[in-house]
Amino acid sequence: MFSNFKIGVRLIAGFILVASISCFVGLIGMSNASQLSDMATNLYERELLGLSYIKEANINLIYVARARAEFVAASSVQARETQQQAVAKYSARVKELIEQARPLFFTDKAKNTFAKFDAAWVDYQKDLQAAIAIA
C-alpha cells in the first residue's frame, strides 16, 4: 500500500506517526508527573508535617525532664517556681503539638499509638505533679 506513494509522502507520514506517538507518550508523562506531584504534596501535608509535630513534642518533653531535674536541684524558692512554670509551659506545649499531629495520621496503628500516649501522658502528669509536690 505505501509502496505506491512517493518517498516524500512516506517520510512525512512516518514523521507524523512518530510525532503523534511522542505527543501521546508526553501527555501520559505529564499526567503522571502531575499525579506524582499531588501525591508528594499529600505526603508532606499529612505524614511529614505530622512527624514534624511529633518531633517538636519530643523536644519539649525533653525540656520538661530538664526543668523537672532543675526544679529538684534548685536551692531557692524563686528558682523552684521558675522551673515549675517551665514544666507547666513545656507540658502544655507537648500536649498542643500532639493535638496538632493527631489529625494528620490515619492508620489504625497510629490511632493506637495516640491512645497509648494519652494513657501514658495522664500517668506521667500525675507522677510529675507528685514529684513537684514532694520536693
Image: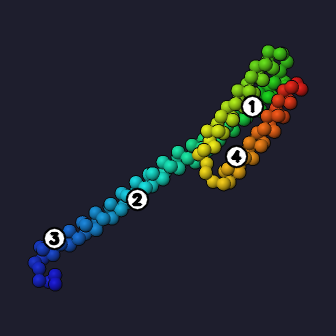
> What kind of residue is marked 3?
Ile
Whether the residues at callouts 1 and 3 have beta carbons within 8 Å, the answer is no
Residue at 57%, 43% (x, y): give it: 49
> What kind of residue is marked 1?
Val
Which quadrant of the figure has residue 131? top right
Circle 1 sits in a helix, a strand or a loop, which is it?
A: helix
* Closer mark to the observer between disc 3 and disc 4: 4
The residue identified by callout 4 is 114
Residue at 66%, 54% (x, y): give it: 108
The residue identified by callout 2 is 32
Q: CA distance from mark 4 to mark 1?
A: 19 Å
> What kind of residue is marked 2?
Asn
Where residue 69 appears, x then y in whole percent? 81, 29
The residue identified by callout 1 is 64
Residue at 81%, 39% (x, y): give it: 123
Q: Give the mark nearest the N terminus, 4 or 2.
A: 2
Q: Which mark is residue 12?
A: 3
In the image, taking residue 19 as reference, residue 130 lies left or right, namely right
